[in-house]
Image (cartoon, rainbow, N blue to C red):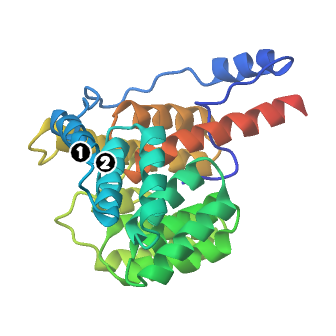
Amino acid sequence: MRFLLLPLLGLSLLGCQSTQQANVEDKLQPLLPIPFTEPMQPNPRAQIEVARYSELLNSAELTRNQRAELYHIRGKLYDSLGLAQLAQIDFNRALKLRPDLAETYNFIGIHHTLRQEFSEAYESFGSVLELDESYEYAYLNRGIALYYGGRKEIAVTDFERFLSSSPEDAYRMLWLYIAHSSVDPITAQAQLKANSQQLNHEAWSTQIVQFYLNEISEEQFLDGIAVGVKTQKEYAERLCEAYFYIAKRHLSTGSYVKAAEYFRLTLATNVYEFVEHKYAKLELRLLREALLKASAS
């Protein structure tokens, strides 16, 4: 999903690079005829919870552990609302009060990865596993950090460990494939095919794997996104995932315009909690950097 040719949003280039950046932006404008929905709106309940926990944190009667727990909870709420900087502040406050909060280190590690602070990310996920070796999502998130940090062979090991905990999970298969295909595409495709035998065909995510295996076309995949959807929220979440994995597929084949459009569409869903949304912005930044570098050479 995230290769050497990734991201566009969030990069501010100055001076002589500004013209190059404008040219790159012009090349990444075509819109695709794809399904869309209204962006998710900030969760009112989460906003009320933020206010409630903020009031509680003003209490002088809280113990050190209670205050740490509240900072952690409020940090997760900020993160779910897309307020990454405020989330980071609360997670750091929580760890200062209680340096044994494994889940907090996990969130800190994700934020380091998004800022391309890979050494710090590896350290954070290592802390998670030192505190709680059963915290399986640390393997996913460390694998992602290793993947974006250019250590793809090691990332494959973490993704294999993550998949082994739930071998029928399509998303775990996909992350393993994404990392593995950047090292050995042929073996990765064969492995994905073998792993797909474990899929739960009642789950909509199975279609993503079928798309990657060329068992269904992109058009068929897009047409199937809305099937069985019961709420607008569920539809937005599916689109967030679908856009991202389609973008990664186009990126791997050198279709950078389509990849950029799909990454932008991923961001437009506002499904902030999802891994796919979090890393779409990084993908765009990396893609922009790669295209600028190519145009300058």
Hey, which quadrant is residue 208 in on the image?
bottom left
Mark number displayed over residue 53? 1
Look at 70% across and 62% down and name the residue there: 150
Look at 36% across and 49% down and name the residue there: 75
Dot 1 amino acid type: Tyr
Q: Secondary structure at mark 2?
A: helix
Mark 2 / mark 1, whichever is N-terminal: 1
* CB atoms of marks 2 and 1 within 8 Å: yes
Residue at the extreme left of the image, as rendered = 230
**Of 264 and 158, the residue lying toward us:** 158
Image quadrant where one finds the N terminus = bottom right
Mark number displayed over residue 74? 2
Look at 39% across and 77% down and name the residue there: 136
Q: Secondary structure at mark 1?
A: helix
Residue 262 % position (x, y): 47, 36
Can residue 16 be seen by looking at this rendering? yes
Mark number displayed over residue 209? none
